[in-house]
Image (spheres, rainbow, N blue to C red):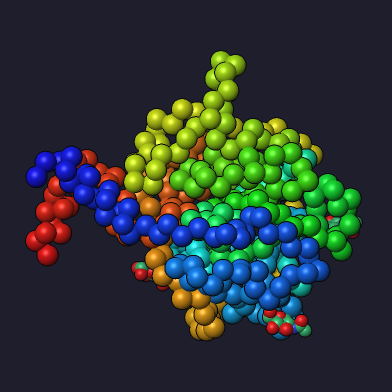
């Protein structure tokens, strides 16, 4: 059997395993005013990947370290949330459909980020989005493994990762500084893993929310999706300009758009056509971490292992991506480069095997035959 035949058969296998289901009512199109949040925003009941595992109505009775709240916020440096697993030491590729909100401040009906989990953070507020990025002790947020992954309002089936996740802010310019009023962000992307995180939520009334919070560059990590100047030990909030839309770059005056290859095609992170730099920022103000994470001061670790009630029967979990994420690091060097694949469908194993040379693949294939 020739190498190319092996390639074709492995690709075919991965195509067969891949789910072709796509929601007729995708999360990114759902307009959900803050005062009309349903118990669960997901409506499709026939998704082969399962159903929403948590809930969107979050209140004082759901505010504990076992919370399955899937409504989160990025408001201010002292009031933001991250998506992270509901059970300890879980990789993002395993948890992506079921991640829950962990927030720095009480009052959102969520888990609280333990003090010490975030070891550095930069928030940049631009005219069109709010970006956060930083470093973390990821096991304190139940994140296991070395590869990170993307969580976003798209997802392989349009249901989002987490399925049914909602994001709000009281800090978009259109909100005029009214902390009591929340606007929904329909386009958002977060990366977490490999000791770092980043996230960007776009103002639906701002410029190009789809392009600035694009979710199709899930293999490129924070440096490309949310270029930033975060550093461990630094806690700062800045104003900033909008970045150029994710994946777009200018060389010698010519604008190009990078196309991320199919999941099955390895990326040479040293040969990407551009290296992003953070858009200009200004008015940066530093804070003491203890002031930002006071709510988590008495919370020592990850949520309890029980986390019962995760009811979503998730089938066809995403693959763990080929690695290489770390190689995507560039620029500030503090952002994560998650090589994992939060928006892939559920074939397991094949993409990693396809990441190697045809010769090595033949060996891998032979090993399978020997089993
Ligand atoms: C609090 O949230 C839970 C979970 O979504 C919900 O079942 C309950 O009805 C809510 N309670 C109130 C008083 O809104
Ligand atoms: C809104 O909340 C932030 C902190 O989360 C605070 O710094 C700011 O002053 C508040 N704005 C108003 C108008 O109260
Ligand atoms: C996390 O899980 C990995 C893989 O199962 C294991 O090797 C590691 O010891 C675990 N770490 C902790 C802190 O439980």
* Quadrant that contains the N terminus: top left
Residue depicted at x 15% and y 41%: 3
279 or 134, nearer to the observer: 279
Instruction: Specify the quadrant of the image occupied by residue 334.
Output: top right
Query: On the rendered image, what quadrant is the C terminus found in?
Result: bottom left
Front-lying residue, 342 or 79: 342
How far across and down, in percent of the image, does residue 321 sit?
38, 53
Q: Seen in the image, is 347 located left or right of residue 245? A: left
**Is residue 185 shown above or below 7?**
below
- Residue furthest to the front in view is 24
- Total labels: the figure holds 0
Q: Is residue 114 left or right of residue 363?
A: right
Find residue 253 and report its horizontal and vertical position in percent.
60, 16
- Residue 147 found in image quarter: bottom left
Above or below, 347 against 217 in this view is below
Whether residue 108 can be seen here: yes
Q: Position of residue 170 (x, y in %)?
A: 81, 57
Which residue occupies the extreme top position in the image?
A: 252
Q: Residue at the location (72% across, 45% down)?
A: 129
User: Which residue is located at x 52 percent, y 45 percent?
Assistant: 216
Q: Nearer the viewer, residue 325 or 4?
A: 4
Q: Is residue 146 left or right of residue 25?
A: left
Report whether residue 297 is seen: no
The picture places residue 34, in percent across and down from the top left corner, at 78, 65
Quarter where residue 181 is shown: bottom right
Ligand 1 image-quadrant field: bottom right
Residue 172 versus residue 162 in the image, above or below: above
């Amino acid at each position: 059997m020739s190498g190319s035949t092996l390639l074709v058969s492995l690709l075919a296998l991965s195509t067969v395993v891949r789910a072709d289901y796509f929601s007729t009512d995708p999360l990114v199109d759902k307009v959900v005013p803050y005062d009309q949040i349903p118990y669960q925003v997901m409506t499709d009941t026939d998704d082969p990947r399962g159903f929403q595992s948590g809930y969107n109505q979050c209140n004082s009775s759901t505010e504990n370290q076992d919370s399955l709240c899937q409504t989160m916020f990025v408001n201010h440096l002292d009031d933001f949330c991250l998506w992270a697993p509901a059970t300890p030491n879980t990789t993002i590729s395993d948890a992506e459909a079921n991640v829950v909100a962990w927030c720095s401040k009480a009052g959102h009906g969520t888990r609280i980020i333990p003090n010490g989990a975030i070891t550095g953070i930069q928030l940049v507020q631009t005219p069109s989005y709010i970006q956060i990025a930083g470093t973390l002790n990821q096991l304190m947020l139940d994140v296991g493994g070395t590869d990170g992954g993307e969580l976003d309002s798209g997802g392989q089936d349009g249901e989002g990762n987490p399925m049914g996740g909602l994001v709000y802010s009281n800090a978009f310019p259109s909100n005029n500084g009214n902390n009591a009023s929340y606007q929904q962000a329909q386009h958002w992307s977060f990366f977490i893993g490999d000791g770092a995180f980043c996230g960007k939520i776009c103002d639906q009334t701002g410029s190009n929310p789809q392009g600035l919070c694009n979710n199709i560059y899930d293999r490129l990590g924070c440096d490309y999706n949310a270029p930033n100047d975060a550093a461990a030990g630094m806690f700062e909030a800045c104003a900033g300009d909008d970045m150029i839309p994710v994946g777009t770059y200018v060389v010698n005056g010519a604008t190009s758009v990078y196309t991320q290859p199919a999941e099955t095609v390895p990326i040479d992170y040293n040969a990407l056509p551009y290296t992003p730099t953070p858009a200009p920022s200004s008015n940066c103000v530093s804070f003491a971490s203890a002031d930002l994470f006071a709510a988590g001061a008495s919370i020592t670790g990850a949520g309890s292992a029980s986390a019962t009630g995760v009811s979503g029967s998730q089938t066809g979990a995403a693959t763990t991506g080929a690695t290489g994420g770390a190689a995507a690091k560039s620029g500030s060097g503090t952002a994560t480069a998650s090589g994992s694949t939060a928006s892939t469908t559920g074939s397991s194993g094949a993409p990693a095997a396809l990441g190697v040379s045809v010769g090595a693949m033949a060996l891998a294939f032979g090993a399978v035959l020997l089993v």
